[in-house]
Amino acid sequence: MKPETLSFFDRVYEVAKLIPYGRVTSYGAIAKYLGAARSARMVGYAMNGSSGKDVPAHRVVNRKGLLTGKHHFDGTNLMQQLLESEGVEVVDNQIKNFKQVFWDPSETL
């Protein structure tokens, strides 16, 4: 299927699948990359609906590095555990060294 025929959510998933292991991005960075800079919340809705789609939703956080989507993961701290298993340090639901592990699709893709 051509990218221009994909739904917004599917386009979000395609970008999220490209986030490198051990890196994170933000809802807003994905929205900006897709040409919908004011649609960060829609990216969040897409991440919430990504279960079963092989999308690393745990690598998408808010613009400050907070794990705002963590309540959509099974288990108490699954989002944090997944990030930590990739070497991303999380303290009080926030990514430590956020700027160092941040991946910007607009700069990379």
Image: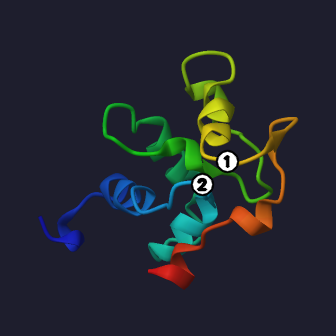
Residue 93, placed above or below residue 86? above
**Depth order, front residue of 63/37:** 63
Task: Describe the element under mark 2 as helix, strand or loop.
Answer: loop
Q: Which residue is mark 1?
A: 87
Question: Looking at the picture, which amino acid does disc 2 mark?
Answer: Gly
| Discs 1, 2 touching: Cβ within 8 Å | yes
Query: Around disc 2, counting alpha carbons within 10 Å, would you say few (fewer than 14), some (14 to 19), or many (20 or more)?
Result: some
Picture quadrant where residue 80 is located: top right
For the N terminus, give its image quadrant: bottom left
- Number of disc labels: 2
Q: Position of residue 76 (x, y in %)?
A: 68, 17
Kindly give the residue lying farthest to the bottom in the view shown.
Answer: 107
Question: Looking at the picture, which amino acid does disc 1 mark?
Answer: Gly
Task: Describe the element under mark 1 as helix, strand or loop.
Answer: loop
Q: Which residue is mark 2?
A: 22
- Please name the residue shown 63% across and 59% down the image: 26
- Please name the residue shown 70% across and 48% down the image: 88
Q: Position of residue 13 (x, y in %)?
A: 37, 53
**Depth order, front residue of 72/74:** 74
**Depth order, front residue of 29/55:** 55
Picture quadrant where residue 7 is located: bottom left
The alpha-carbon separation of the residues under discs 1 and 2 comes to 6 Å
How is colour applied across the structure in the image? rainbow
